[in-house]
Amino acid sequence: MVKSAMPKEGTSQYRLRAGKERTRLDKFLALALPDISRNRLKGLIESGQVRISGKTIAEPAYRVKPGTEVELCIPMPTAEAAPSGQSMALDIRYEDSDLIVVNKPAGLVVHPAAGNPDRTLVNALVAHCGDSLSGIGGIRRPGIVHRLDKDTSGLLVAAKNDAAHNSLSHLFEAHDIERAYLALVWGTPTPMHGLIDGPIGRSPHNRKKMAVVSRGGREARTHYRVLEHLANSCWSLVECRLETGRTHQIRVHLASRGHKVVGDPLYGGRQGSGRKMLPKITAEALMSWHRQALHAYRLGFRHPVNGEILNFESEPPSDMRALIAVGRN
């Protein structure tokens, strides 16, 4: 295996030649560049930084033939600017010197990212908490230990110091946090309660989506329970409890069973097999619905410093309650 660097402004570039055995691209790069983490290499592959025979290869499982020359470009990290504080109204459910629990509205991004540089929950937390959040959990995500999708509403906890952040992070890693969601879905899952156990990874057909995959994914488990039938049984109100916390986990798991979250723009929840059977008033309400009907309504954990058991509940926001009410008529 031969390696030669090709310096280029703003990047580190490598030319690597495969050995005598056919192997996965991510494994090949991990062996060739042991100082770079496998997660980092996987991200570089998926973001289009690897070329073979002049062609971009974005699949970590791609099989590299013996003797193949692989080109890898590693963009140099740019200095990240710390999020500035921006005063915004916060629905605070609990706060002390160690942590804060907020009820996030739909439409609010949790932390700055491409396309959403400011006006995020992090900006609001920095304004509210002051310098205590500085540096905790990274520059762009101070205090953040878990996320909710932009258009998912509900309860979220953030840490206000390093000790609380580390302790909460360990609780999440150990799946020792109670997280329950209310989801409005198409159809009725069967059986009426159960476990969806399927690894989640990047969709091989659409890189913007996640999917239940046969290989290469991360373990994911969602416990669900049907609470109520709605809209002539076209919809169901379902409680979902997370055992793991993967990107879009509930939306992906329910869609994999044929029960997409109502209104989900990414996983097809605007369409449903029973759509033509909806009562007129329900169909009209659906036409104006603009996001996935998903709300994080329960959050429970042991306080990271004093050990107190904390439990919180939040009813769905008014727009989701109205949609559920229409489905009951």
Image: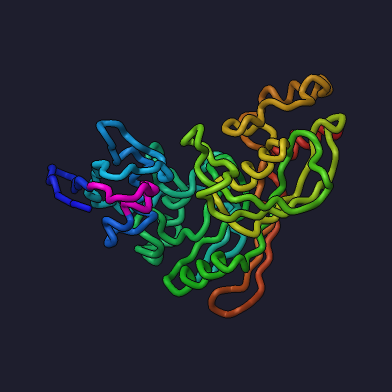
Does residue 171 appear in this view? yes
- Identify which residue, 293 or 32, lies in the foreground: 32
Q: Which portion, as a residue range, is magenta?
A: 17-29
Q: Specify how the rendered protein is coloured.
A: rainbow
* Count of numbered circles in the view: 0
Is-magenta flag for residue 25? yes
At 69% across and 34% down in the image, what residue appears? 262
Residue 112 position, x and y percent, is: 40, 46
Work out which residue is located at the far front of the displayed protein and give it: 20
Does residue 200 appear left or right of residue 234 in this picture?
left
129 on left or right of 299: left
Question: Residue 71 appears at what percent x and percent y?
Answer: 24, 42
Q: Measuring 28% from the left and 37% from the top, which residue is drawn there? A: 51
User: In the visual, does 67 lie left or right of 101?
Assistant: left
Residue 315 coordinates in the image, percent (x, y): 72, 49
Q: Nearer the viewer, residue 268 or 118?
A: 268
> Residue at horizontal 24%, vertical 52%?
79
Within the image, what quadrant is residue 68 found in? top left
Q: Is residue 322 on the magenta stretch? A: no
Q: Nearer the viewer, residue 319 or 304?
A: 304
In this view, the residue in front, 223 or 280, is 223
Give the quarter of the image for residue 139: bottom left
- Residue 94: x and y, percent? 60, 64
Please say whether residue 314 is visible from this viewpoint. no
Residue at x 41% of width, y 55% of height: 141
Q: Is residue 195 above or below residue 64?
A: below
State the quadrant of the C terminus. top right
